[in-house]
Image (spheres, coloured by chain):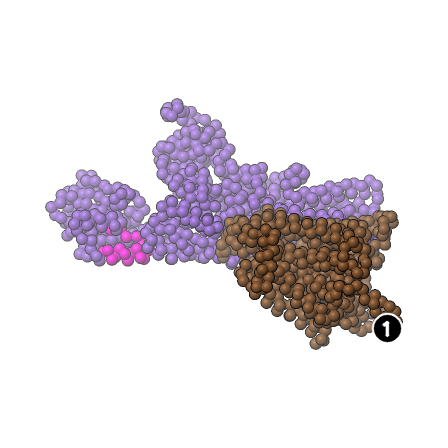
Amino acid sequence: MKSSGNKLFEKELVMTSLKASFVKLNPKVMFRNPVMFTVEVGTLIMLIVTAYTFITKDHTQGSFGYNLTVFIVLLLTLLFANFAEAIAEARGKAQADSLRKTREDTPAKKIILMGEIFLNEIHTVSSVELKKGDYFLCEAGDVIPMDGEIVEGLATIDESAITGESAPVIREAGGDKSSVTGGTKVLSDRIKVRVTTEPGESFLDKMIALVEGANRQKTPNEIALTILLASFTLVFIIVCVTLKPFADYAQTPITIAAFVSLFVCLIPTTIGGLLSAIGIAGMDRALRANVIAKSGKAVETAGDIDVLLLDKTGTITIGNRKASHFWPADGVNEKAFMEACMLASLSDETPEGKSIIELANTRSMNTPVLKKEEVLKFIKFTAETRTSGIDLDRALHLQKTGSHNGNVATLDDPCIRIRKGAFDAIRNIVTKAGNQFPPATAEKVKEISGNGGTPLVVSQNENVMGVIELQDIIKPGIQERFERLRKMGVKTVMVTGDNPLTAKFIAEKAGVDDYIAEAKPEDKMNYIKREQTEGRLVAMMGDGTNDAPALAQADVGVAMNSGTSAAKEAGNMVDLDNDPTKLIEIVEIGKQLLMTRGTLTTFSIANDVAKYFAIVPALFIATIPALKAMNVMNLTSPESAILSAVIFNAIIIPLLIPLALRGVAYKAIGASALLRRNLLIYGIGGVIVPFIGIKLIDMLISLFL
Amino acid sequence: MNSEYLGIIFSYILTICIALLLARYIAKVFLGEKVWTDKLFGPLDRFLFRFMGIKEEEEMTWKEHLKALLTINMLWLVYAFFVLLFQDKLPLNPDHNPGQTPDLAFNTAISFLVNCNLQDYSGESGATYFSQLFVVTFLQFVSAATGIAALAIVFKALKEKTVTKLGNFWVYFTKSITRILLPISIVIATVLAFNGTPASFKGKDTIITMQGDTQNVSRGPAAGMIAIKHLGTNGGGWFGANSAHPLENPNYITNVTEIVAQVILPVALIFAMGIYIRRKKFAYIVFGVMTVGMFMLLIPTIVSEVHGNPAIAHMGINGANTAMEGKEVRLGIPASAYWTTMTTIISTGSVNCMHESMMPMTGGMQLLGMMINCFYGGCGVGILNYYIFIIIAVFISGLMVGRTPEFMGHKVEAKEMKIAAIIALLHPFLILAGTAISSYVIVNHGGAAWTVQPKNWLNNPGYHGFSEMLYQYTSCAANNGSGFEGLADNNMFWNVTAGFVLILARFLPIIGPVAIAGIMAQKKFIPESAGTLKTDTATFGIMTMAVIMIIAALAFFPSLALGPLAEYFSMK
C-alpha cells in the first residue's frame, strides 16, 4: 500500500474533519487539552457577554457587534484547533482504512479440529469468525483471511496489497519466513495456517485505534510539554485576573472582551491547538512509510536512538554475495576448475551458488547437463561439514564428456568427489586425506578475505583445485546515509555472519562505525545490552524467531512483516515492506515529530511579544494617553488592536496545519546548528511575524470600523 | 572619561578578578580538597561536628538534605521571633529600644531568615545590639550559608553520573560559613572599621551640629554586620538609611568595598560551578548570559539617571545632575546607578541612595531585575533560580533538535517539568497576587479602620503609588529587601502579607531545583553524542535568555505598564 496521493487536504477528508471539529467542542473532549479548554471557557464567557449586551443594550462592555465579533473569532480559534486534530486523524484513518479494506470479510476455509487432530473437514466461514488458535487452509487463488503462521506447506504469495511490491514471495512452514498477513493472496500451492491474532487485535487494528484517538495515550514528551503549556496558561490566568484590581486602582475600566482577548492571545493556543495533530501526524507519517508502530511512544523513541544495528545483507550490501573471480590452484587448468565449480554448484539453490554458474556462463562455459545415472549423490550443505558438492560416477561422466577431467584426479578412483566450502572446512578434508593444501592458494584465500570478499575453496577427490571469490556489492549511496546518521549522533553497527576480516573491510567501505562479525543471535543481544547499560538507546531490525529476544530488548525493535509472529510480537514496530533500510527513515520520522512540537512551541510563545504590544496599550490608552508611545504598531483604535490580535491568533492555527501535518524538515547538521537554525526561523520569526500580521489585519479592519 | 564612570568600571573589574580567584577556592572547599584555611578553621569544624554529633562522611539523599535544611531554618525562625519580641528585656540595649510588635517581629524574623532583609523598622530605634548581633547578623550568616549549601547539593548532582547520595548538608553548611563567609567577612569588616564605620558597644553618641543643635548619633558594633550584609547578599542595614547612611558607608572606599563585596560570591559561585562540575565553558556561558542581562538593566538606569529629571527640565532648569533627589553627593550619580542595579539583580537590597526617588525608568529596571532574579542572583540561590530556566530552555530546545531533552547527561521528563513549571509560576503569582490584593484593598476598603488606613498607605498617588506596592511584593518575592520607602509598611497588613510572600518565595525555589537535580542525578547517565544538544554554546545561552525574557519579564508587562512605564511616558 503506497500512500495514496500526497495532497494534504482531500475534499472528502476535509468534510468529515469539519464535522468532527464541531463534535470535538464537547467540554469532556476538550478537557484533555488544558490550553484549549481555557479558550473554550473564554468563548463561553464571551457568549454570555454578547447575549447580555444584546438583551440589555448596555454598552459599558462594548457594543454588541464588537462582542459578537470577539465571540466568533474565539469560536473559530477553537474550531481551527479541532479541525487540525480532526484532519490529522482523518488522514491517518484513511491510510489505515485502505489497509484494512483488503482484509474485510473474506471467506476462510476453516479446518475443524478434534482435540489436537486435524480432521480433513473444512468449513467455509467468514474471516471475522476466525479466532486466535484456529487453523485455516489456503490454496492457489485464495486471499488469506487473517494474520497467521504457516504450520504446514509452502506457497508463493502476492503481498502487493500490503507492500506495493509486485514480485511474489515464498513463505513456508518452519523457519523465519512462516508468517502470512491477512489480505495477501496465495498464488500457488497450499498452506495450512494457524491464526495468531484475535479479531480486532491485529497490529493494524492497534494502529488504527492509536490514530483514531480513542486509544491514544500521551507520550512522555507530550505529557511534559502539556505541563509546560498548562503552566504558561496558569501564568497568564494570573496576569489577567490580577489586571482587574490593577486597572481599578488606575481607574481604567477594562471590558470583559478585552480581558478574555488578552488571555486567549497570551496563552500558547497555537501549539496547544496543534499539539495532538502533530502527534497523530507522526504516526501517520510512519504508516505512510509502511511502518506499523504499536505505540506513539515507539515513534518518539526512534528519534532518540543512539545506536542502530543493521544487518549487512540487504541493508548495507545488495542482496547476497556474488561470485566475481575464479582463482585456479597452481597447475590446475582454468577450464577444468570452472567445470568443477559448476558441478559443485548444480544442486546449490542459494544465490551464491547460482551466481557461480552465472559467472562461469559469462566465461563461455556451458552449464553441464548430468544424466541421472551419472550422479551418485548430491551433497547438501550442512552446518557440521560446512561444505556442499556432488559425487559423480567417474566412468560414466568421462565417457559422456570425453574429457579426462583434470590432472589431479586419482585415476583408479571410481568416483569423482567435488566439494566446495569454507577454507578451513576444505583444508580439513584435504589434509585428512594426506594431501597438502597449496600455499599459493592459502595466500589467495587470505588476500580475498582482506579485500572484503568471501573465498570458497573447491576440491576434487581431496585435492585443492582453486578458490572462488565472492564479493559483496555495497549499495550505492549508503555511505552518505551513514554520514547523515553520524551527524544526527546515531552510531551504526553492521551485523554479519562474515569472518572479522571481511566484516572489517565492508564496514570500512560502507562507513559504518562498528561491526559484529560472525554474529550469532546472542551476540546481538549482548551488544544491545552493553550499549544500554552505558545509557544508549538501541534500535534494530529483525525477522527470525531467534531475533525475538533482541527485538524485545532493543528500545526500538522493528520486525519485518515477513518475519515470524514471535519476532513481530517482540518488536514495537512492524515494517510492511520488509525493507531493512527502513530504520533510517523511522529515526528521521521520530526526530521530525519532536522537532515539530519544539519549533511550534517556540513560535507560539514568541508570538506573545507582539500581542502584548498590541493589547496592553489598547487596554489603558483611554485613561493613560501617555501609553500611546507603546503602540509601536500604530494600530488604529483599541478595539481594532484587540480584534487584530485575536484574529491573528485564530488564523495562525489553520495556516500552520500543513506544517504540523508534514512536520518540520529535519536537517542532519548537528544539534547546535539545528538549534540555531530553528531558533532563527521559529524564534525570531515568531517574534516578527505577528507584528506584521497584526498590523495588516488592523489595516484591513480599520476599513470597516 | 569621567572619573565617576571609571569608578564603576573599576568596581566591576575588581569584582570579576576577586570572583575568579575565589572560584577555585570555593570549588575546592566543596570538593573536599585541602585549602589553606583548613589550618585555621579545621579544628573549629571538627569541634562543631563532634559537639553536635554530625558524621562528616554520612551522605544524604536530596530528600534528607531538604529535611535538614528546612528543619534548621524552622528552628531559627522560632528563635528569632522570640528574641525580637522580647529584645527590650535582653541585655545589650544601651539605647533602651522597645521590643518589636508581634507582626513586626514575624516580618523581621522571616525577612532575615530568608535572606531578604526587608526592614519594616529602623535599626536605630527598632532593634537592640543584642538582636542586631544574635538575630540579624546571625541570620545573615546562616541564611547565606543555607543558599550556598543548597547550591552545593545541586553542584554534586550535576557532577555525578548516577548517584542518590549527594554529600552531607551539615558539612556543606558549616564549611560555607567557616571557609567562605567568615574569613572574607573579617577582611571586609576590618576595611570598613578603619574607614569610619562604628564598631563599638557604646550607646548613642551626642554631637553639637554646626547650627548649635544637640543631636544623638546612633552607633554600635556595626562593621561586622555590614560586612556579612553585603557578602551574604542580605542587605539589611544597621541603620534605617542602610548604606546611604554616612556611618554605614562613610566614603568612596567603603562604597567600592561594599558594592564589590555583595557581587563577589554570586559571580564566584558561577565560576566555581564550572570548576566543580568540570565544565568551565558552561559556566562562562552562564556568566555571559547573566552579564548581558545585567548590562541590559544597568545601561538604561545610568542613562536615565544621568540624563536628569524631565520634570525639572520642564521648569526650565537644564543641565546635568538634576536627578539628585535621594542620592548622596559624596557618591555621585553613576556609583548610585551601578549600586542600584547590582543590589536589585542580586538579592542584596542594600541601598546607597533612595530607590523611590530615582527616575521612573530606573524604577522599572529595578523591578525587572528583581522579577527576573537570576542575573547573578542571590548567594547560591541565584544559580538555583537560573537552573529552573535552564531546565525549561533545555526542554524546549531539546524538542527543537528532535531529541528527548537532556541536561548534563540526564533526561528531563514530566516530573522535572512539573517542578520547574511550579517554581517558574510561583514568582509572578506571589508578586501579582500580592499587588492585586493591596490594590483591591486600597480601592474598595480605603477607609477601613486599621492602624494605618489603606488610603494612607501610599506616599504618592497614581502610577508611582502603584510602583510602591509592586516594588514591595517584588522585593519580597525576590528575597531582595530593598524598598520604595514611601510605602507605610510597618502595619499588620504589610507585615503579614509580605511575611508570607517572603517565606514562600524563599523555600520553594530552593526545594524545586534541589529536587529536580536530585531526581535527575538518580537517572541513567546518557553519554554525549553528536545528536546531544550542547548546553555550553552561545546558541543555548541565547535560548536561555529568551526563556527568561518571555517567562520572567513578559508576565509582568501589564503591571510594569501601569507603574513605571506609565510614569515614564507621562513625564516625558
Whether residue A497 is situated above or below residue B274 in the rendered picture? above
**From this viewpoint, which residue is outermost toward the bottom?**
B1
Q: What hue does chain B carry in this figure?
A: brown
Residue B571 in the magenta stretch? The answer is no
Of residues A32 and B97, which is closer to you in this image? B97
The residue lying toward the viewer, choosing from A383 and B186, is: B186
Residue bounds of the magenta highlight: A441-460
Location of residue A378 by image quarter: top left
- Please state the chain letter of the residue tagged with numbered disc 1 in the rendered image: B
- Which colour denotes chain A? purple
Q: Is residue A361 left or right of residue A408?
A: right
Front one among B95 and A666: B95
Whether residue A666 is visible: no
Q: Nearer the viewer, residue A76 or A362?
A: A76
**In x, y percent, where is residue A148?**
43, 34
Q: Please give the name of the residue rendered at 45% of the width and 38% of the height, measured from the top-left corner.
A: A569
* Spot occupied by residue A349 in the image (x, y as percentages of width and height): 29, 43
Question: Where is residue A694 drawn, in percent x and y?
Answer: 70, 55
- The residue at the point 45 percent across, 57 percent down is A483
* Residue picked out by circle 1: B210
Q: Say what secondary structure mark 1 lies in.
A: loop
Give the class, few, some or many, for how many residues have Cα within 10 Å of label 1's Cα (few <14, many ≥20). Answer: few
Residue beneath the point at 71% across and 71% down: B194
What kind of residue is marked 1? Answer: Met
Query: In percent of the image, x 44 and y 55: which residue is there?
Result: A482
